[in-house]
Amino acid sequence: MKISKILSYVVLGLGILGAILWYVMSSSISTLMDQNGVSEARELPFDIAEPTVSPLYFLTLIIFVIAIVATLIAVFSTLAKNPAGLKNAAIGIIAFLIILGVGYVLADGVETPLKDGEVLSASGSKWVGTGLYAFYVLAAVAVGLMFLSGIKKLIGK
């Protein structure tokens, strides 16, 4: 059995385990919120020691790290076996970085007051704008490629 297939099963199993843990942890957090009279989890005091939330949170982080490592191993093992794929991956990464760079140049950085009284810094605002511009460009490219693909199928190439 190939390592990529094994890693796929590991990631699938971790995903199922993560969903179960998320359900158990979210119900515990909901109970904690009700007990402390808060409406959002971020309003909970840090010193609450709930026996079901802390270990599950730690386990969820471990599963998350394992899933990332397994995914990276699968990706890099596939790229190592296919040098042409490595070139295509490098082209994609460079194109993405160029889109982020253009988005960063276009974005404005303005301090922005938030609903909770905090202030979003000019740098944070610039990065949010960068993400939005990158999203718009990538969405436009995706829609354009789907449109182009549909036209090619209609023409019959």
Image (cartoon, grey):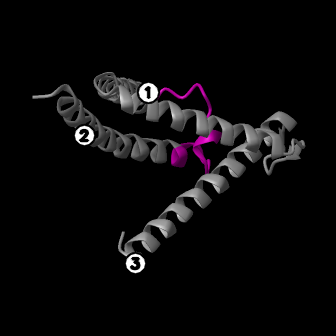
Q: Amino acid at mark 1?
A: Ser
Dot 2 falls on a residue whose secondary structure is: helix
Q: Earlier in the sequence, mark 1 or mark 3?
A: 1
User: Gap between marks 1 and 3, in whole Å?
Assistant: 56 Å
Label 2: which residue? 12
* Circle nearer the viewer, 1 or 3: 3
Q: Position of residue 3 (x, y in %)?
A: 19, 26
Residue type at mark 2: give it: Leu
Q: Which mark is residue 154?
A: 3
Q: Label 3 amino acid? A: Leu
Indicate whether 145 appears above or below 56.
below
Looking at the rendering, which quadrant does residue 4 occupy? top left
| Residue 122: quarter of image | top right
**Most foreground residue, 110 or 37:** 110
Rendered-image quadrant of the C terminus: bottom left
The residue shown at (60%, 52%) is 138
